[in-house]
Image (cartoon, rainbow, N blue to C red):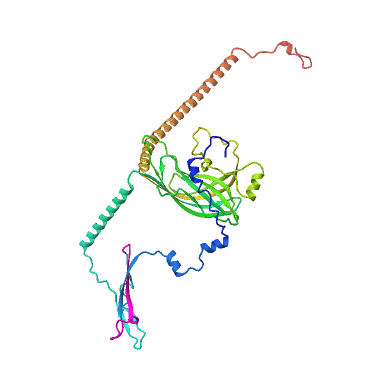
Amino acid sequence: VTDADDEVPSYLAQRMATVRRRRQDRRPIEGSSLKSKVITWEPSEEFIKNNHVINTPVQTMYIMGDLGPYGKLGHREYEHVLCTIKVDSNGVITVKPDFTGTKGAYRIELDGEKRELWTYTIENASAQVQQEDAEREQRVFRDLYSRHKEYLSSLVGSEFEMVSTMGAQVSAQGYEYDNLYVHFFLELPKCWSSPVLQQLSGVTQTCATKKDNVAYFCYLFTLEMFFSQEDESEDSFPQWPVLYFEVLSVDFWQRYRVEGYGSLVLPSSPGLHTLTIPTWRPVELGTVSELRRFFIGGSPELEDLTYVRTPTAFKGERLSRLGFRTKTTGSVTFRLHCLQQSKAFLETSALRQRMQSVLDRLGGLSQQSSVYSVLEAFQRARRRMQEARGSLSQDLMGTAAAAWHQRREPGPPPRLPPACERPASSPCS
């Protein structure tokens, strides 16, 4: 990707190099044959029993009745099932037909010359449990449940932080070619771990797009992660795991093309999240690369998928991407159900809520009272300023009027000089 001489693939890139390609030894499946293999249009009874019915292990007991005439007992044609009792592994007892109720006795009519009619009833002959025995049984059950709860708690522990994400890659839309599939993997930052058998990567099925240029995957996956704080004095919020993915297309000749790269930081809040992530792919200048991509497949691709954000092997302060040309492609939609379990987070949240309530009660009231006091002081100062301005204007007006009156009182008004008392036709100098 870059022209650096000292750039080497990271450990993650080396481990993922063997699973980045899909199988090339099988021909693509057309849409019609794919539907015929995925959907069974005429399912048999055995198929329904094995795939659509929950088979719970049960123990079955039959209560039979030999209704044959005297001298012909023991023949199979005269044997009839009077009642069937089933007990499954959960301790549920099923009686069929049910105990005789208000409808009356059950009837069995034989197909013989005499047309014999037999009637029978099914009743619960077990003795009713006493009140003391019932209470003792309830205490035994409560004791058993409490011990089982303590056993599960001992297995899980009390000091742990776990994040579980159940997600689905819903769809991919806006890409150039058809028959898309998505390869993804999860990167765990520092202080994060996962179970030994946990799969942190996966590849979806190949999906053909429809008229609206959307490929619907609905590929389900489950991710479980554990966070352990190594330094107790460190109060910084932990870095969250990142889900990297790449979208590829494959044609009839098993030629694949990289359609886009993207990354998704797992949501830090629990609940349902529907996220649409845009993708991009690297490009080269000129038409040769596009012709190669169209005719023989293949395109520029990243050796290390973590280059989508910050590479894992990068240890510097600044990451330069100058000269790296990309092109915006489509987008991938994820639907994630996030579940978080943490005793420390719960205690911190409760403490934060309590502190917030205390601050609201103390700081909020004091702030409100200080605002009110400032407003009252401003109103008082404004009234004083208005009063002072009004009194000052009145004093100035009175002083000016008195001075003007004093200037007019000492003598008569001034008289024009005699030279100006000439006719209007003569000039006045």
Would residue 67 be found to the left or right of residue 12 on screen? left
In the depicted view, which residue is nearer to us: 139 or 217?
217
Q: Quadrant of the C terminus?
A: top right
- Asked whether residue 365 appears in the rendered view, the answer is yes
Where residue 130 sits in the image (x, y, percent)? Answer: 21, 64
Where residue 320 sits in the image (x, y, percent)? Answer: 56, 34
Q: Residue furthest top?
A: 418
Residue 362 falls inside the magenta stretch: no
Residue 86 falls inside the magenta stretch: yes
- Asked whether residue 52 appears in the rendered view, the answer is no
Give the magenta range: 67-91
Q: Quadrant of the N terminus?
A: top right
Where residue 62 sits in the image (x, y, percent)? Answer: 31, 73
Number of disc labels: 0
Q: Residue at x 41, y 33 (%)?
A: 367
Work out whether 142 lies above or below 397.
Answer: below
Quadrant of residue 127 in the image? bottom left
Q: Residue furthest bottom?
A: 113
Q: Residue at x 64, y 46 (%)?
A: 290
Q: Residue at x 46, y 30 (%)?
A: 379
Q: Residue at x 56, y 35 (%)?
A: 5
Would residue 141 be found to the left or right of residue 32 on screen? left
Quadrant of residue 50 in the image? bottom left
In the depicted view, which residue is nearer to us: 144 or 261?
261
In the depicted view, which residue is nearer to us: 61 or 293?
293
Q: Residue furthest right?
A: 425
Where residue 325 sits in the image (x, y, percent)? Answer: 60, 40
Would residue 287 be found to the left or right of residue 350 on screen? right
